Image: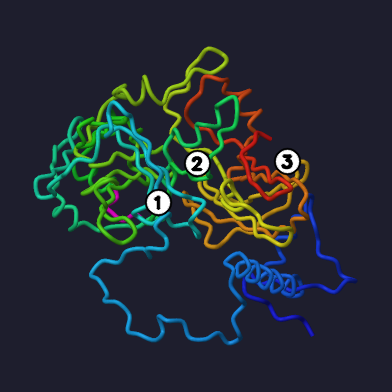
C-alpha cells in the first residue's frame, strides 16, 4: 500500500536502511516536504527539544500534559476595537528608519523581511523612500491631469477614478537602490531586512492606465514616452516608455484591500509591475505624453551609473532576479545542531521565478528548494528547504532563476560587469555564514 500524501511542511523519519537524501552541506531533498516517510520523528523530537530548551532558558518547569488553564482563560478578555493593531508582544517588528540629518523628511525605511512570513507585506511595514516628506493631501482637492500629446486633456478626481472598472495585482515594489550596501568593499553587518528590505509585496487595486490614456486620446504616433509626476514637495517624476504604460501599468487606489496609506501614495499612485520603484510615482498628480524622456533629476544625476567601458547605464527599469534567505539570517542565533528550515524570498521583474537553489557550502554544491504556491509574476515567491545542521561552520546562499532563464549572479560576476562605481540594481547572491556557535553573519562568498 502506498503511503498517503502528507500536508506540505510535514516530514516523516525514514528507517535506517533508507537514508534521507542529502545535498552538500546537509541540505535535504526539497521533496521531503511533500512525501511521507521522511522526517516526522525528527521534527517531533526537534519540537520537544526546542520546548525543553525554552523552559530551561525561562527557568521554568515543563508543565503537565495537558497544561493547566492559563490566567487569561479565567477572566473575560479585553474590548475589541474598530481598527485592529498588532499584539504588543510584536512591538519590535517595525521598519528601520534612516533619514538625512540635515533634511529629516528625506530618507528611507526598510521592511523587516527577516521577521515576516509568506509573501505579502503588511501595509504598515511596506518600505518607504521619501525625497521631501509625506504630503498631507486632502483627497477632494487632489486631481490627476493627463495632458501633452493628447487629443483631450483630462483631469480626474479620486471620486471619478472610483467609478472605473478596477483590477488587482499581487506585485512587488523594489527601490532601485535596494541592497546597495553590497557594493561596499566589505560586507555590512546588519539584518536581512536592513540590507534588502527596500522591497515589499502587496495586493494593489486600481484602474488600468491604458483606459485613461485612451480616453484622453494619446497620440501614439508621436508620444513614445509618458512623464509621471507626484504631488509631494519634491515633485518627484520619472519618464516611462509609452509601450509599458499601455501594457500593464495602472493607477493604484488600494493596497491590501484598504485605501492607500499616506506614506505609500494616498490618494493614488502609479504601479509599474516589475520595474524599479522610482517609476511607481506616489501621490500621482499628472501624466504628460511626450516625444522623448524628460531627463529629470531621477533619470540623469540619479539612477544612472558609469560602467567599466566608460558608458553609462540609464533607464535600467527592469528589476533583475534576486533572492535572499530570511531564516537563518543575521540576528537569529541557532542554538544547537539539528533540523532547521531554510526559507526566504525570491522575485524578478521579468515575470515568474521558476527555480531557487540553496547551498550550505558557499556555492560548492546546490539543492533545489520548494517554491510555495502560488508562484505569480512580479510577485514575491517564498522558498523553503530542510537543513540538517551538524554544528560545523557553513555558508548559506540562495540563487534564483526566472522564466526567461536569467540566473542571479555571484558578487564577483556582478562587480566584474558593473565595476565599482555602481549604486543601483545590486542583485548578487547573498551569503550568510553560520559559525560553530550558531551565530549568523554577512560575508562575501
Q: Observer-nearest residue: 61 or 359?
A: 61
Residue identified by numbered label 3: 362
Which callout, 2 or 1, points to the residue nearer the camera?
1
Q: What element carries label 2?
A: helix
The magenta segment is 204-208
Residue identified by numbered label 1: 94
What main secondary structure does the magenta stretch of the protein show?
strand
Would you say residue 381 is visible in this rendering? yes
Distance (Cα) linking label 2 and label 3: 20 Å
Q: Which residue is drawn at 50% across and 36% down?
A: 179
Between discs 2 and 1, the one toward the N terminus: 1
Q: Which dot marks residue 312?
A: none
Q: Which residue is drawn at 32% across and 57% down?
A: 167
Q: What element carries label 3?
A: loop
Q: Position of residue 32 (x, y in %)?
A: 72, 66
| Picture layout, residue 430 above or below residue 37 | above
Q: Where is residue 16 in the image (x, y as percent from the top left)?
A: 88, 71
Q: How crowded is mark 2: few (under 14 residues within 10 Å), some or many (20 or more)?
A: many
Q: Which dot marks residue 196?
A: 2
Between discs 2 and 3, the one toward the N terminus: 2
Which callout, 1 or 3, points to the residue nearer the camera?
1
Is 207 included in the stretch rendered in magenta?
yes
When asked about the image quadrant of residue 92, the answer is: bottom left
Q: Is residue 28 left or right of residue 215?
A: right
Amino acid at each position: 500500500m502506498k503511503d498517503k500524501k502528507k500536508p506540505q511542511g510535514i516530514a516523516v523519519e525514514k528507517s535506517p536502511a533508507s537514508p534521507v537524501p542529502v545535498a552538500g552541506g546537509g541540505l535535504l531533498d526539497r521533496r521531503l516536504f511533500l512525501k511521507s516517510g521522511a522526517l516526522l520523528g525528527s521534527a517531533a523530537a526537534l519540537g520537544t527539544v526546542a520546548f525543553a530548551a525554552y523552559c530551561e532558558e525561562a527557568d521554568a518547569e515543563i508543565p503537565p500534559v495537558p497544561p493547566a488553564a492559563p490566567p487569561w482563560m479565567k477572566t473575560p478578555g479585553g474590548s475589541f476595537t474598530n481598527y485592529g493593531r498588532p499584539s504588543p508582544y510584536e512591538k519590535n517588528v517595525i521598519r528601520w528608519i534612516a533619514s538625512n540629518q540635515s533634511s529629516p523628511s528625506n530618507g528611507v525605511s526598510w521592511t523587516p523581511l527577516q521577521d515576516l512570513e509568506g509573501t505579502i507585506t503588511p501595509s504598515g511595514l511596506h518600505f518607504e523612500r521619501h525625497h521631501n516628506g509625506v504630503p498631507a493631501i486632502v483627497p477632494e482637492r487632489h486631481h490627476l491631469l493627463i495632458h501633452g500629446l493628447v487629443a483631450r486633456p483630462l483631469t480626474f478626481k479620486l471620486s471619478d477614478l472610483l467609478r472605473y472598472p478596477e483590477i488587482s495585482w499581487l506585485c512587488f515594489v523594489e527601490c532601485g537602490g535596494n541592497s546597495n550596501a553590497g557594493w561596499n568593499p566589505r560586507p555590512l553587518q546588519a539584518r536581512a531586512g536592513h540590507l534588502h528590505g527596500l522591497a515589499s509585496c502587496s495586493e494593489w487595486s486600481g484602474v488600468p492606465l491604458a483606459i485613461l490614456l485612451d480616453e484622453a486620446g494619446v497620440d501614439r504616433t508621436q508620444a513614445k514616452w509618458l512623464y509621471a509626476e507626484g504631488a509631494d514637495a519634491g515633485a518627484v517624476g520619472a519618464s516611462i516608455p509609452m509601450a509599458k504604460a499601455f501594457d500593464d501599468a495602472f493607477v493604484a487606489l488600494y493596497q491590501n484591500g484598504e485605501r492607500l496609506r499616506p506614506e505609500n501614495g494616498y490618494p493614488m499612485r502609479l504601479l509599474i509591475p516589475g520595474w524599479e520603484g522610482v517609476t511607481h510615482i506616489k501621490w500621482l498628480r499628472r501624466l504628460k505624453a511626450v516625444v522623448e524622456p524628460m531627463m529629470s533629476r531621477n533619470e540623469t544625476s540619479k539612477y544612472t551609473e558609469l560602467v567599466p567601458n566608460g558608458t553609462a547605464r540609464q533607464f535600467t527599469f527592469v528589476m533583475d532576479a534576486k533572492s535572499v534567505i530570511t531564516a537563518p539570517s543575521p540576528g537569529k542565533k541557532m542554538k544547537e545542531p539539528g533540523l532547521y528550515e531554510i526559507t526566504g524570498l525570491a522575485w524578478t521583474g521579468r515575470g515568474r521565478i521558476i527555480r531557487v537553489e540553496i547551498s550550505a557550502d558557499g556555492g560548492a554544491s546546490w539543492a533545489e528548494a520548494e517554491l510555495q504556491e502560488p508562484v505569480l509574476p512580479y510577485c514575491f515567491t517564498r522558498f523553503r528547504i530542510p537543513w540538517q545542521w551538524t554544528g560545523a561552520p557553513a555558508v548559506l546562499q540562495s540563487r534564483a532563476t526566472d522564466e526567461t532563464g536569467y540566473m542571479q549572479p555571484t558578487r564577483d560576476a556582478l562587480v566584474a560587469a558593473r565595476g565599482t562605481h555602481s549604486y543601483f540594481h545590486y542583485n548578487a547572491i547573498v551569503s550568510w555564514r553560520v559559525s560553530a556557535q550558531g551565530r549568523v553573519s554577512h560575508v562575501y562568498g
